[in-house]
Image: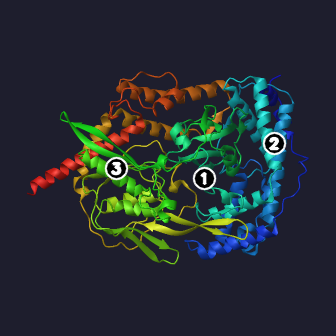
Amino acid sequence: MSLFATLSRSVALAVMLVVTSPAVMAQIAPTDEQRQAAVEIADALRYGHYANITFDEQWSQEAFQRYLDILDGQRAYLLNRDIEPYRHYENDMAEALFNGDLDDAYALYNQLSERNIARVEWLLARLDEGLSFNFDSDERLEIDRENAPWATRESELDELWRKRLKNDALTLALTDQDDEQIVDNLRQRYEGQLSRLRQTESEDVFGLIMAAVTSTIDPHTGYLSPRQSESFDIQMSLSLEGIGALLQADGEYVKVASLVPGGPADRADVLEPADRIIAVGQEDGEMVNVVGMRLDNVVDLIRGPKGSVVRLDIVPAQAVDMTRSHIVEITRDTVSLEDQAAHGEVINVERDGEPHPIGVINIPTFYVDFDAWQAGEEEYRSTTRDVAREIERLKEQGVEGIVLDLRNNGGGALQEANSLIGLFIDRGPTVQVRDAQGRIQLYGDTDAGTLYDGPLTVLVNRLSASASEIFAGAIQDYGRGLVVGSSTFGKGTVQTLNDLSHGQIKLTRAKFYRITGKSTQNRGVEPDISFPSLIDPERIGESSLDNALGWDTVQDVQYRRYGTPETFMDALSTQHAARAKENPNFRYVERQSTLARQLREQHTSVSLNREQRQRELEAQEAEQLSLENQRRRALKLPELDEWMDARLESSEPSDDADENGEDEGMPADRAPVLEAAEILLDYAQFQQAQRMATR
């Protein structure tokens, strides 16, 4: 007999199956150390955070709501009556925090834990009935329930979980697993979840409570447990001896926020921002489902010794259904300074049959060999020194301009961004840093002279953050060159790590401002000429994060401009638009971005009918494949038969590139570099014409 045929004919029975005997589990309570740490965190937030925080009833309401969202963001476990005894937190959560009174916050977690464990046992009981699967109803499952009301009856959640179980099974069925494999895989998944739930400790709960408290204020402030203090970053980091990917929680999933330049994942070219990780395996071991698993536990699974292999089951960022996953292998390794070093190349832009050499310097991060620098070594490695060396090499080759590629550069050493600006200007301020007291410290280039005063373009994207934004903003403000690409990340805050009696707190203490007085926070740096991007700013970037600090301004500072790129902007934009219209890679990215956005907006629920689900998936993938093949036809490349091949092929170089790597069969990711060089040549020629006219 079919499981879902049985369930369909016995909905009443399924709905009546309420959890009457939740698993007996020891109640988790706060320790004295955690109570004291809560008081210290409250004081640190009140007296040390950049923002002027008012711990009033409104803050308490927001913090309590945040706690509920962290505990049960999809409204799938708790009933309204479970929450009611704790509604007093809407008025006095701040007071409880400052008094170290965590008892009720723990009690609410214990209530959730009982519901969660009982629900997983309910799922396992359905599997133990030994039923197979049939998917022929017209039902649909709502995907995102974060705005759904809290259920008032157990039967409402039974119905939700009946559909969730059916969806889990259908997802596996669409990967051609038989009934036995589906049951085995689901049992392994649910038993793993149950085991993890039963291993929860007091420190885990304290971390959730403090996450609610700190993330109500800003997304970069957070508590680090003694164990997390050993990590590179509390919310989105793997050890540099790992795969080199920055991760963040996204509902029940863990997604890739960015890749560490030069890291194993970056070199393997198998991950992209916004890809979701649904399972992790070690070497040849079994895959462990990580859907619903806490971020730091996922990090622990992925982290490992150098030379070992980790397998990740990935749902691509562009996929609209969890069935379209694939497994990638990454060999763990350390990220060396050499892997992240700036490096240059020369590409030739053809105009009227004549080649025009343009230099391109890729700067993956702002780095400095601190140990060598502190030891007083004269030849220590740094971004500025390596870029200076590349500039000299490019000048010897007679380039007519230089493109600085800061795409995916997440920042790094502020001193390096500051000194790098100095290669292109002759003294002057570079960035303002404002602390919580309103005091402003001005950083600048104090060295006389410039290393390069020719035409300059800075290429950025949504993953250009922090120090990259300071550099791009300064070049733009000085009129020293053009900024092209897409809007940057918008990370304009500074954090410090402070010790507590128990753990640490990462605290936002200051904010960056450009020399014009404009903040880089939240809005980032807007390019002079925009390129299409596959990175959705609603999913990646500061403005996509809850409670991100806002954009504002301070007083500007005195500085002199080196040029007036805005004089040529209309003409530059017109010529760029004409090229972009005919550029297959640009058209592909623009159409793919539009399609992905439309699919996300339409994809609010999934069909639980196998044939309908298959049709929806095939239609979506056909559209994506069609876009890739339109690009390939325009580039005179062979067309592809599968959508997954399309994703891989669009990010890999063709075999037809010349020694300059300039053929149009290069991946879509190469197009922005080539177009930046075209724009730079336009700019250089306009400048030359202007100089000739004024003689």
Q: Residue at x 55, y 39 (%)?
A: 271
Q: Which x, y percent locates residue 569?
A: 25, 52
Q: Tell which of 620 and 252 is nearer to you.
A: 252
Q: Tell which of 371 and 332 is nearer to you.
A: 371
Of labels 3 and 2, earlier in sequence is: 2
Q: Is residue 689 visible?
A: yes
Q: Tell me the element at label 3.
A: helix
* The quarter of the displayed image where residue 617 is located: top right
The kind of residue tagged 2 is Val
Quadrant where the N terminus is found in the figure: top right
The kind of residue tagged 3 is Glu
Q: Which x, y percent locates residue 170?
A: 70, 29
Badges 3 and 2: C-beta atoms under 8 Å apart?
no
Q: Residue at x 24, y 54 (%)?
A: 454
Q: Is residue 81 visible?
A: no
Horizontal side of 462 relative to 356 (left or right) equals right
Q: Which x, y percent locates residue 160?
A: 75, 41
User: Which residue is disc 3 drawn over?
Assistant: 390
What colour-coding does the image apply? rainbow
User: Which residue is disc 2 drawn over?
Assistant: 120
User: Which residue is disc 1 drawn over?
Assistant: 236
Give how far apart the Cα atoms at labels 3 and 1 are.
32 Å
Badges 2 and 1: C-beta atoms under 8 Å apart?
no
Quadrant where the C terminus is found in the figure: bottom left
Q: Nearer the viewer, mark 2 or mark 1?
A: 1
